[in-house]
Image (tube, grey):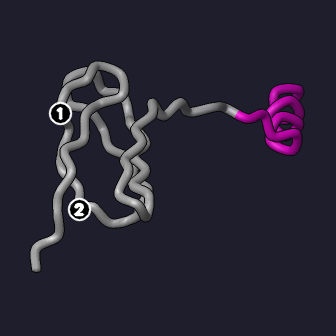
Amino acid sequence: MMKEKVRIKCASCGEEIGELHKSPEKKYMGCGSCGKRTLVTINKDGSVITKLYEEKHILHPNTENAVKSSLKK
């Protein structure tokens, strides 16, 4: 039995970026047109959610202190 496939579109520009099997999973897919990444979530009931993946830079106190101390030397 072949599993049904779902066509995935970019969350930013709407361009088609690929196909995935309709099985529950989370996946990041990159767009060739705009270069942004889309987070694709396929739920158990077969519904598909696509949203733009935004990379957030979280300041880590130990790293920040290490950089500051190395700059003082």
- Residue 22, image x and y in percent? 27, 61
Classified by dominant secondary structure, the portion drawn in magenta counts as helix
Up the image or down, 29 lies above or below 33; here it is below
Could you say whether the residue bearing mark 1 is in a helix, strand or loop? strand
Q: Is residue 31 left or right of residue 3?
A: right
Q: Quadrant of the C terminus?
A: top right
The quarter of the displayed image where residue 58 is located: top right
Mark 1 Cα-neighbour bin, 10 Å: few <14, some 14–19, many ≥20: some
- Front one among 63 and 21: 21
- Numbered label attached to residue 7: none
- Residue 3, image x and y in percent? 17, 70
Q: What amino acid does circle 2 point to?
A: His
Q: What amino acid does circle 1 point to?
A: Glu
Residue furthest bottom in the image: 1
Which segment is the magenta one?
Answer: 58-73
Q: Residue at x 39, y 55 (%)?
A: 42
- Front one among 20 and 30: 20
Mark 2 Cα-neighbour bin, 10 Å: few <14, some 14–19, many ≥20: some
Residue at which label 1 appears: 16
Query: Which of the two discs, 1 and 2, labels the residue nearer the N terminus?
Result: 1
**Could you tell me if the residues under marks 1 and 2 are in contact, i.e. CB atoms within 8 Å?**
no
Q: CA distance from mark 1 to mark 2?
A: 15 Å
The quarter of the displayed image where residue 18 is located: top left
The quarter of the displayed image where residue 65 is located: top right
Up the image or down, 28 lies above or below 71; here it is below
